[in-house]
Image (tube, rainbow, N blue to C red):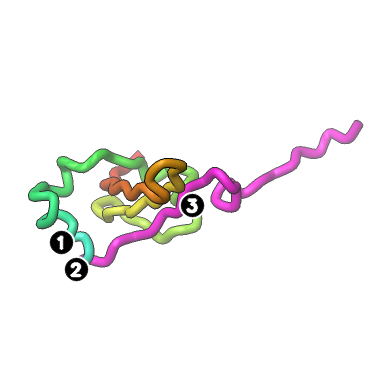
Amino acid sequence: MSSEKKVMKITNHIFQPKHEILSKNEAQEILKQYNTKPSQLPYIMLSDKGLEDLDVRPGDIIKITRKSPTAGQSVYYRYVVEG
């Protein structure tokens, strides 16, 4: 048996939802639509493996699109924080 570890990039996994950074304008539209502040959104940590391919910074807002058997697609928003 080999002692090599198999490394898989989590962002390529079929169950990993799509993560996108919103532009400043898109983020403002979403915040206005939901009448909220960035700090009121659920948080996602900068160290989250789903963000490893994105050039994210604390304060960014991430759009997460998940496949849903009932809705087709579900969209979630997260506020990036240190960690």
For the residues bearing labels 3 and 2, Cβ distance under 8 angstroms? no
Specify whether 37 is left or right of 82. left
Q: Is residue 23 above or below residue 46?
A: below
For the residues bearing labels 1 and 2, Cβ distance under 8 angstroms? yes
Badge 1 density bin: few <14, some 14–19, many ≥20, Cα 10 Å: some
Q: Earlier along the polypeptide chain: callout 3 or callout 2?
A: 2
Specify whether 61 is left or right of 54. left
- Give the residues in magenta: 1-24
Badge 3 density bin: few <14, some 14–19, many ≥20, Cα 10 Å: few
Residue 32 covered by magenta stretch: no
Q: Which residue is mark 2?
A: 25
User: What is the chief secondary structure element of the magenta stretch?
Assistant: loop
The residue at 52%/46% (across/down) is 16
Amino acid found under the numbered disc labelled 3:
Glu
Q: Is residue 53 above or below residue 10?
A: below
Amino acid found under the numbered disc labelled 1:
Gln
Depth order, front residue of 56/37: 37
Specify whether 61 is left or right of 69. left
Query: What secondary structure is marked by label 3?
Result: loop
Q: Which residue is mark 1?
A: 28
In front of the other: label 3 or label 2?
2
Instruction: Point out residue 35 in the picture as x, y percentages from the top left corner.
Output: 8, 50
Query: What secondary structure is marked by label 1?
Result: helix
Q: Earlier along the polypeptide chain: callout 3 or callout 1?
A: 1
Q: Which residue is mark 3?
A: 52
Depth order, front residue of 40/80: 40
The residue at 26%/47% (across/down) is 79
Gap between marks 3 and 1 measured at Cα: 24 Å
Amino acid found under the numbered disc labelled 2:
Asn
